[in-house]
Amino acid sequence: MSEDFRAETGFVEEVGRIGAGGMAAFHIRDLSWSRSVDPNVHAEAVTDFSGQLTGVEAGAGWEAFVGKDGYTEGRVDYVRERFLGVDFDRWSVRGFAAASPTPATNIWVDWDFGATPNYNAESAAETYLGFAWQPSAGATVSLFERATVDYTFVYYRFGRDAFSDAELEGTLNRLKLTVNISPPVSIRLIEEYNAFEDTLDSSLLLGWQKNYATAVWLGGQESRSVVTGEAEHGVFGKVSVLFRN
């Protein structure tokens, strides 16, 4: 990704980077408690165009289908990360597990914890290596084959170490309702309480989708402060058309 690559409207956080990575996995099939277990080792590295190492990640992980409807994956990594010109050597543990108790329900948990730089710092002198916890959980329920309800809970805590007083702590509670009125027409409603910002965020989206590339979307959103009652509003729309020769 060159220095001139425009990343403002995408999910790329850094430009001027060259990266490479790899993974080796071992597949174990048809165990008494699992349909498959796939342990792995992995590594990746990123440099800038001058050859300066900006990131390294290496570790071991797993992926497994447990029982009839269970799934889990995770990884434990050593990480070298450059932030504000400072190199941090740290470790992280991440994982995910899900199960479907019934054909219409799915529940899951997710965890991510480990040593983490203070990303709120604005200069190298202010940053330091702290510790962050981020467990989350959620559930999905299908109703009458036309509606789906999703609930997500996220907790985040950052401090000087794993058990010191938190310097940043909060939760997110998110409820999403999706209704398929007909095959091409759908409605999506999202309500989210953000304890970090003390806001209640609402979003309504109407959609018409003929196929994967021909669609019309129209929506509105509101972010209201729980403390002051002040609110910001917005509307948005998108049209996409597929042309075939």
Image (cartoon, rainbow, N blue to C red):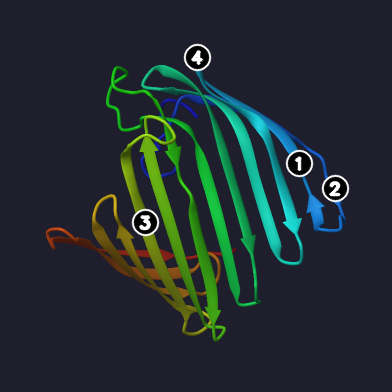
Viewer-proximal residue among 178 and 217 = 178
Q: Where is residue 197 in the image (x, y as percent from the top left)?
A: 25, 51
Secondary structure at badge 4 equals loop
Q: Mark 3 to mark 4: distance in Å? A: 37 Å
Question: Where residue 64 sits in the image (x, y, percent)?
Answer: 74, 52
Judging by the rendered image, the residue that carries numbered circle 3 is 172
Q: How far apart are marks 3 and 1 (CA)?
A: 32 Å
Above/below status of 201 relative to 189: above
Q: In which quarter of the image is residue 93?
A: top right
Amino acid of disc 1? Pro
As shown in the figure, which amino acid type bears the numbered disc 3? Leu
- Asked if the residue under mark 2 is in contact with the one under mark 1, i.e. CB atoms within 8 Å, the reply is yes
- Between tags 2 and 4, which lies in front? 2
Q: Residue, x 32% and y 18% (percent of image)?
A: 124
| Mark 3 in CB contact with mark 1 (< 8 angstroms) | no
Q: Which of marks 3 and 1 is nearer the N terminus?
A: 1
Vertical comparison of 31 with 51: above or below: below
Mark 2 or 3, nearer chain start: 2
From the image, tell me which residue sits under label 4: 52
Mark 2 or mark 4, which has the lower sequence index? 2
Q: Give the residue at mark 2.
A: 28
**Circle 3: element type:** strand
Side (left or right) of 220 relative to 162: left
Q: What's the mark number on residue 25? A: none
> Looking at the picture, does residue 223 appear above or below residue 24?
below
Q: Position of residue 222 (x, y in %)?
A: 24, 64
Depth check: 1 or 20 in front?
20
Instruction: Identify which residue is drawn at 57% across, 42% down.
Output: 94
